[in-house]
Amino acid sequence: MNLHISRETNKTDKQYINEELYKFNLKYFPEDLRGRYEEINLYLKDDNGNVRGGILAEVCWNWLEIHIFMIDEDIRKSGFGTKLLVEMEKIAREKECDFIKLDTLSFQALGFYEKNGYEVFGSLDNVGRDYKHYYLKKDL
């Protein structure tokens, strides 16, 4: 059998990789956690329905992972980020998650997350040459 490496972007192939890894992982998780996957997205909108920020996350097994958290620069430090984060934590508790995990860069929101009870459990130096990449977790 001849195999080759392909770099093409293909939704079907990507879905195959995701599904096969998911099936493999299921063998190692308890019955009650199997099938626990759900996208959870929160949006901050103005009176005209324009998105001004939001959190894109997912529940996976016994945790919630925040992938993207953004607030428009002109309304940062106005409390909206904390409101979104508190709402996401409430959802995570309702979904019986044990913890939330996320990551941030040193020029982004490390202090914000720490102020809200998240703890650094790892970091990488030399990201973009001058920055650090932090991995954080909050037990619920």
Image (cartoon, grey):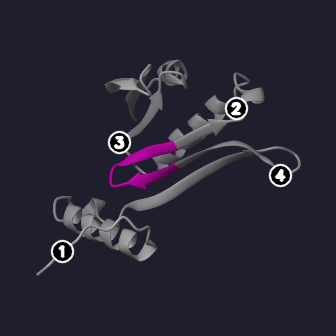
Whichever of callouts 3 and 2 sits on the residue coming sooner in the sequence is 2
Outermost residue on the bottom side: it is 1
The residue that mark 4 highlights is 49
Q: Which mark is residue 15?
A: none
Whichever of callouts 1 and 3 sits on the residue coming sooner in the sequence is 1
Whichever of callouts 4 and 1 sits on the residue coming sooner in the sequence is 1
The residue that mark 1 highlights is 3
Three-letter amino acid code at disc 2? Phe
Contact, mark 1 vs mark 3 (Cβ under 8 Å)? no
Distance from label 4 to label 2 (Cα)?
16 Å
What residue lies at 54% left-to-right and 25% top-to-bottom?
A: 109
Distance from label 1 to label 3 (Cα)?
42 Å
Of tags 4 and 3, the one toward the viewer is 4
Three-letter amino acid code at disc 3? Asp
**18 relative to 90 in the view: left or right:** left
What residue lies at 32% left-to-right and 68% top-to-bottom?
A: 6
Three-letter amino acid code at disc 1? Leu
Judged from the image, the secondary structure of the residue bearing numbered disc 2 is helix
Q: Which mark is residue 80?
A: 2
Q: Nearer the viewer, residue 138 or 65?
A: 65
Distance from label 4 to label 3 (Cα)?
33 Å
- Residue 116: x %, y % from top left: 51, 24
The residue that mark 3 highlights is 98
Contact, mark 4 vs mark 1 (Cβ under 8 Å)? no
Outermost residue on the right side: it is 48
Judged from the image, the secondary structure of the residue bearing numbered disc 4 is loop
Three-letter amino acid code at disc 4? Gly
**Could you classify mark 1 by the number of other residues whose Cα lies within 10 Å: few (under 14), some (14-19), or many (20 or more)?**
few
Whichever of callouts 1 and 2 sits on the residue coming sooner in the sequence is 1
Distance from label 4 to label 1 (Cα)?
50 Å
Whichever of callouts 4 and 3 sits on the residue coming sooner in the sequence is 4
Judged from the image, the secondary structure of the residue bearing numbered disc 1 is loop
